[in-house]
Image (cartoon, grey):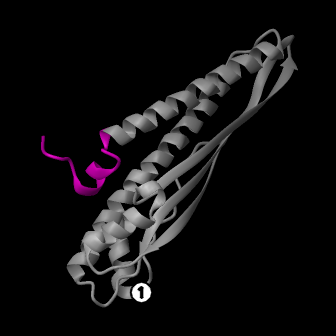
Amino acid sequence: MLAAMLIANVLHAAQPTAPPPYAPAVPSGVEVSSKVRLYDIRGSTMSTLRRQMKRRGPIKWAAYTRWFLSWNWETERRDGQCHLVVPEASVRVKFRFPSWLPSEAADEATVRAYDSYAAGLWVHETGHADIAVDTATKIVSDLEGLPPRDTCRLLRKDAADVSLAHYRRAGITEKAYDRDTDHGATQIYGPSPR
């Protein structure tokens, strides 16, 4: 689907390629915002485009995703106990992604190859963002399930422990994701024969 959109974008509109908006479905209490910052690449062959991405891309990668996760809650005293209310989590995602406007020298095979590459790259980068969104969702869900405590101090500690545990697991999950996908190569080119 993304490849078709990118191909249509390039062949019919003569606009630089850009990924679609990142807009995951999220439950109540989770808010997501994202921004894509594009960098231009030029060339008429895939080898030239790859060199451009390596030279101009973030940290020598073709693309990069960075996310920021925050969470919050309120407490209230009721029936002699402290209850956690209104748990919320917010995810801000920043993508850095290549943008290519094919020159007249680029043939249709190169356009299709780049669009396929960009589609796989976007799948990989949104996978990173999905980890953050999934973490935010788990935090809110687990905070909603916390039982009341005798003191709000104890409840706040419980809430902080739950939230930080999920946040730490997200870092581990991201490393495993990059390892398992060979930093997106399996999503761009398919699984490598071993």
Q: Is residue 84 above or below residue 53?
A: above
* Relative vertical location of residue 88 with respect to residue 189 in this rendering, above or below: above
Front-lying residue, 45 or 173:
45
Residue 97 is situated, as x and y percent measured from the top left of the image, at: 46, 63
Residue at position x 40%, y 56% in the image: 61
Q: Secondary structure at mark 1?
A: helix
User: Which amino acid type corresponds to the residue marked 1 in the rendered image?
Assistant: Ala
Q: Is residue 164 left or right of residue 40?
A: right
Who's the residue at 33% across and 84% down the image?
11
* Magenta stretch in the rendered image: 180-194
| Residue 77 appears in the rendering | yes
From this view, report whether residue 77 is shown above or below residue 182: above
Residue 135 horizontal/vertical position (percent) = 54, 35
Examine the image and state in which quarter residue 4 appears: bottom left
Would you say residue 184 sits in the magenta stretch?
A: yes
- Residue 183 drawn at (x, y percent): 35, 47
Q: Residue at x 32, y 66 (%)?
A: 50
Tell me the quarter of the picture where residue 99 sits: bottom left
Q: Which residue is mark 1?
A: 13
Magenta-colored segment: predominant secondary structure: loop
**On screen, residue 51 above or below 8:** above
From the top left corner, tell me how far across and down residue 171 is, in percent. Answer: 50, 34
